[in-house]
């Protein structure tokens, strides 16, 4: 079975964890959540000798998707055709508002993103020959998806779950109940040994968060119910 290498590239003032993943044997892979600083991401791609086959998005917030279009253009100029894949189409309104929001934050170089392929629960994406399951986990945004590689015991969770916290839900479209339901019903059942990369901050494991994350107190894996939260 192919082994994947992973490098995180924190980008923009939001310090969002853009991820570069590739297969050790073929050096083919993907960029997940290029939130900005596309030239820096491209430099990492070249430094590791990776051929990028896709740009994957977990959700439509500017700090996760704002650099996707520029990165696609830069990769194309370097001879690499990398379609933008994801998230769920319920985040279209966020992708369409990136440039305007970026001006409000004073962050240059972020563009609206138009996926070549939207994603839905039950589909798969492939990174370096490894299949990742797509799970729809709304609450932080309506169309948030996560990527799970069962064979590697690895997940990329975006802004669903963090070390010691969960994604923000204080947006007009946020829904904490939906987010906790998604974590209980879809994330916790992945297994305590699953390592995950989150959108901001250090990585963790499902087991560590189930034991110590105060937002998960009382959540029962697989049931979508909670107590004491």
Image: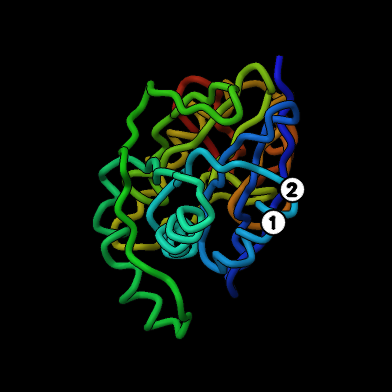
Determine the residue positioned at 32% across, 58% down: 95
Is residue 78 among the parts visible in the rendering?
yes
Q: Which residue is painted at 57% across and 31% down in the image?
A: 127
In front: 104, or 22?
22
Residue for point 43% across, 59% down: 73
Of residues 149 and 44, which is closer to you in this image? 44
Tell me how far mark 1 sits from mark 2, CA to CA.
Answer: 6 Å
Q: Position of residue 147 (x, y in %)?
A: 52, 33
- Asked if labels 2 and 1 touch by Cβ distance under 8 angstroms, the answer is yes
- The picture places residue 72, in percent across and down from the top left corner, at 44, 55
Q: Which of the numbered marks, if any, corresponds to residue 26?
A: none
Residue 224, horizontal then vertical, whole percent: 44, 27
Q: What residue did someone put label 1 on?
A: 44
Q: Secondary structure at mark 2?
A: loop
Q: What residue is pinned by disc 2?
A: 48
Total numbered labels placed on residues in the image: 2
Residue drawn at 41 percent across, 49 percent down: 59
229 versus 127 height, above or below? below
Q: In the figure, 39 relative to 146: above or below?
A: below
Q: Secondary structure at mark 1?
A: helix
Q: Position of residue 7 (x, y in %)?
A: 72, 48
């Amino acid at each position: 079975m192919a082994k994947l290498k992973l490098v995180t590239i924190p980008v923009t003032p939001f310090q969002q964890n853009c991820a570069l993943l590739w297969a050790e044997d073929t050096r083919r892979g993907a960029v997940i959540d290029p939130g900005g600083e596309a030239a820096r991401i491209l430099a990492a791609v070249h430094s590791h000798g990776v051929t990028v086959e896709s740009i994957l998005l977990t959700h439509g917030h500017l700090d996760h998707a704002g650099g996707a279009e520029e990165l696609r253009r830069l990769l194309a100029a370097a001879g690499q055709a990398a379609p933008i894949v994801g998230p769920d189409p319920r985040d279209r309104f966020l992708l369409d508002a990136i440039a305007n929001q970026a001006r409000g934050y004073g962050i240059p170089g972020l563009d609206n993103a138009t996926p070549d392929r939207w994603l839905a629960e039950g589909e798969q994406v492939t990174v370096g020959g490894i299949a990742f399951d797509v799970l729809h986990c709304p609450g932080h945004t309506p169309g948030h998806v996560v990527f799970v590689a069962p064979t590697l015991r690895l997940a990329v969770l975006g802004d669903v779950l963090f070390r010691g916290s969960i994604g923000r839900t204080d947006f007009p479209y946020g829904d904490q109940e939906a987010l906790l339901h998604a974590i209980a019903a879809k994330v916790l059942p992945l297994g305590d040994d699953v390592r995950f990369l989150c959108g901001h901050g250090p990585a963790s494991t499902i087991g560590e968060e189930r034991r110590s994350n105060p937002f998960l107190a009382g959540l029962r894996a697989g049931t979508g119910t909670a107590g004491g939260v």
